[in-house]
Amino acid sequence: MDDNKILQQISSIFSIFMIVFYIGAGIFLIFFFEKSIIDKETRTIIGSAFLIYGTFRTFKAVFQIKRLFFDKEETDNEQ
């Protein structure tokens, strides 16, 4: 296997943890972060941005993981 592909696979696995962080932070800011100096509207906007970005990263990570782990490798010898 190629070293570059191994690094891409590690990066795609790490992206799953970042997705959990973004979606978790968004849910926490919107629903559970009550006592703070930040007003509710700002928390909702920031939390929504985290949720939208987490959703975007989810789709991106699914396609990357599918490509890296489940697609057959095409080599130059097979034509």
Image (spheres, helix red, strand yellow):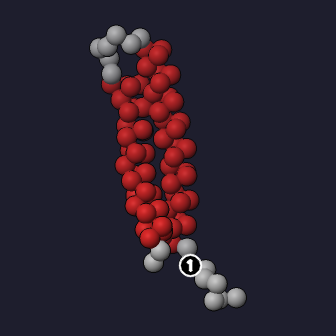
Q: Residue furthest left?
A: 35
Q: Residue at the location (52% across, 43% down)?
A: 55
Q: Residue at x 43, y 63 (%)?
A: 7
Residue 26 placement (x, y as % from top left): 42, 31
Decide if residue 19 is on the left or right side of residue 68: left
- Please give the name of the residue rendered at 65% of the width and 89% of the height, measured from the top-left corner: 78
Name the side, left or right, on which 39 lies relative to 35.
right
Quarter of the figure with the N terminus: bottom left
In depth, the one of 9 and 23 nearer the eye is 9
Above or below, 73 against 27 in this view is below
Residue 72 visible from this viewpoint: yes
Rendered view: 67 above or below 51? below
Where disc 1 sits, the SS reads: loop
- Amino acid type, mark 1: Glu
The residue tagged 1 is: 73
Identify the image quadrant of the C terminus. bottom right
